[in-house]
Structure formats: C-alpha cells, structure tokens
Image (tube, helix red, strand yellow):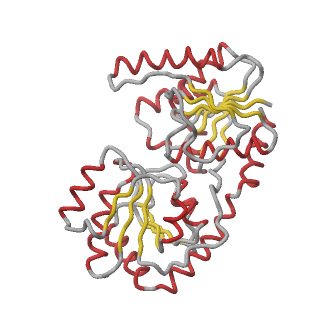
Amino acid sequence: MNVKLILSDITSSAGTERATINLANNLSKHGYLVTILSLYTTQGTAYFNLNDSVVIKHLHIRTSRFLILRILGFFKTFSVLSKNVPQNSDIVLGTNHVHNFILSLLCLFKPTNKYIGCEHLSYSALTPYSKFLVKLLYRRLDAVVVLTDVDKLNFNKNVPTVLCETIPNELSFYPPDPSPCDNKILLAIGRYTYQKGFDLLIDLAALALKDNPGWVLNIVGDGELKNDLTTQITRYDLRDRIFLIPPTKNILDFFLESSIYLMTSRYEGLPMVLLEAKACGLPVIAYDCPTGPRELIKDDDGILIQMNDSEAFLKNLLLLIGDESKRKQLGRNARVNSMDYNSDTVYQKWESLFSKL
C-alpha cells in the first residue's frame, strides 16, 4: 500500500519532522511504499536518518510573510498537492492543521484516497480562527490522529463525526548505555520560540546556578528569539554557564553527557525530546503545559510542576542538583518507562487505524 506523508520542510530539525521521519521509517520497514512530499523545499535531504526505501519529493512551493500572499499560497499548495496525489487509493497524511485543511478539500476531488489529519500541537494551542476551520473542515477527513487522550477528548467534542485516534510519537533511539547522570550539566532542546519558554528557563537557571558552582545549562536549538535569549543570558552575566548551541545531528551525545532534562514550554503536543531524554536515562522536570508532559512523566521517573509555579520548579531543580542518588534512580525508571513508546507498539496502533479506513 502507498502512503504519502506531507511535511513543510524535510530538511528541518524540528520535532514534527523527527516524528514524521520516524513514522516513515517504521511504515517502510513493514512493507509500505512511503513518499514524503516536502512542500516548501527545492532540494536537500532529510535532517534525520531516513530509510533509503522512502522517497522524498520536493514540491518547490514558495512562502511569504504577507497575509494576502499566504492566503494565495494556500490555494497554490492545494493545486500542487492535487497534482502530486493521484487518485489511486493511497493513504495521505497531513502533519499540521494547515496541511489537514487542504486534505479536507482535496478529498472532494480525489475521493478514493484515505485522508488522515495528524496533529502535533494541542488543540488548545490553535488560534480561534484555526479552531473554527477545524470544526468546519475536519469532518471531511477519514480520520484524525492526535498525540494525547486529552486532545482526543477535545476533537471528539468539536468534530464528533470524524474518527479520532490517539497514537503517540515513537522513540527515536534507545542507546545501549544511558547517561550516568553524574555530570554537572542541565539540558534543554528546542526552537528558540515563545512556545518553548526558554526565557522562563533562563530565569530559573540563573537562580539555580548561582549557588551550585560547576553546573552549566546547554540549550540546543535555533530560532527567532536567539538574540533575545542571548541578551537575557548576558544580563545575568552567565555567558560562561548558559550556552546556546546550534542544532546538531549528534544530539544523542548531549543527552548522554547531561544529568537532568528541563522543559518550560508554554504548550506542546507530545514532545519528542522528553521521550528521547527518558530513553537516555535522564530525569525530567517539566511544567504541566497543555499538552504532553503530563502524559509522558510518571511519578517515579520525573517531576511535573504546575504551570508557571517557578518556586516549585526551582525547588525541585535544586533538589535533583543536590541529590545524585535520586536523579540516578529517576533516570533508571525513565529509561524503563520509555519503552512504552517503542516502534513496534506504535506501529500496531497505526496498523489498527489503517484497518478501520
């Protein structure tokens, strides 16, 4: 069976791309003929490891920051996708709500295909306009896949006529040896955007590092707020202890040399980095943002903090910094619990969904 996955940019190092490539590899391994349609690229390879059997097709669609051109771009994307999605009973998956809006229209013209809208952010993070379009258009899709049961409830409530399934992201890797959790290194990973809340993290780290000599914080990523974060670090005079590190394909090395993973996101879907941190044996401290951390962090492998309770976050961070035995125990449990998201378990959920279409 043919499966087409729609991505904005196959060369991106973001979490959606990581999750989609994992899915492509998994389906390909089980005999599906997988093609990734990369909308806004003209050339390039996948940032993450991609099986040779998975085909990449660059669609060369241009984007713009101007609203009227973005609206026109929506119809341009519809036209290009229509030409690249033949009517031959393929399964077609969108990977964000804009793709899914397009698929909900495309199904009117290519009805023999099966169209699945995949959501990588929480329903609560959508704008009011996007929520309106979800209610209006998603009912045309054959199915919607969300990452958490909380979002399944939201979609069942707002689009009750469409089949909705919870299928989490799968583990990207499971190294043979975990982090020893004895280096004085804190870690966070993600795009430098408002969503990820790294400004909140730097405020917390400034207090935690003050009384803990030798400890440092690595924040791996890039994005539009890099200059703002750099200024914030400079204001705290912590340029030698908080480091903004460009994205790297050797991200596993950063996990394995760190001792605590920190997440201060304002909202998420089901964050890949938390799964990866757990697979590497790292204890996690995260805000209970909508959604993701609550689904991934268990009482015995990490610490979930009420959103914006900086005092509790700092208290627990200082606790783990000062208690090597506790962070190692949480890390061991995290590694065991991460196997709930192994590729075979996740594949069975996708296979079950396909059988219902």
> 300 or 47: which is nearer to us?
47
Kindly identify the residue that appears in the image at 30 percent across and 75 percent down.
209
Is residue 266 among the parts visible in the rendering? no
Quadrant of the rendering where the N terminus is positioned: top right
- Estimate the x, y position of residue 262 in percent, counting from the top left: 43, 65
Kindly identify the residue that appears in the image at 54 percent across and 25 percent down.
101
Of all residues shown, which one is farthest toward the left? 235
> 211 or 254: which is nearer to us?
254
> 111 or 205: which is nearer to us?
205
- Estimate the x, y position of residue 167 in percent, counting from the top left: 66, 47
Instruction: Please tell me in which quadrant of the rendered image residue 116 appears.
Output: top right
Quadrant of the rendering where the C terminus is positioned: top right
Left or right, 79 with reference to 175: left
Kindly identify the residue that appears in the image at 40 percent across and 35 percent down.
127
Is residue 63 among the parts visible in the rendering? yes
Left or right, 347 with reference to 107: right
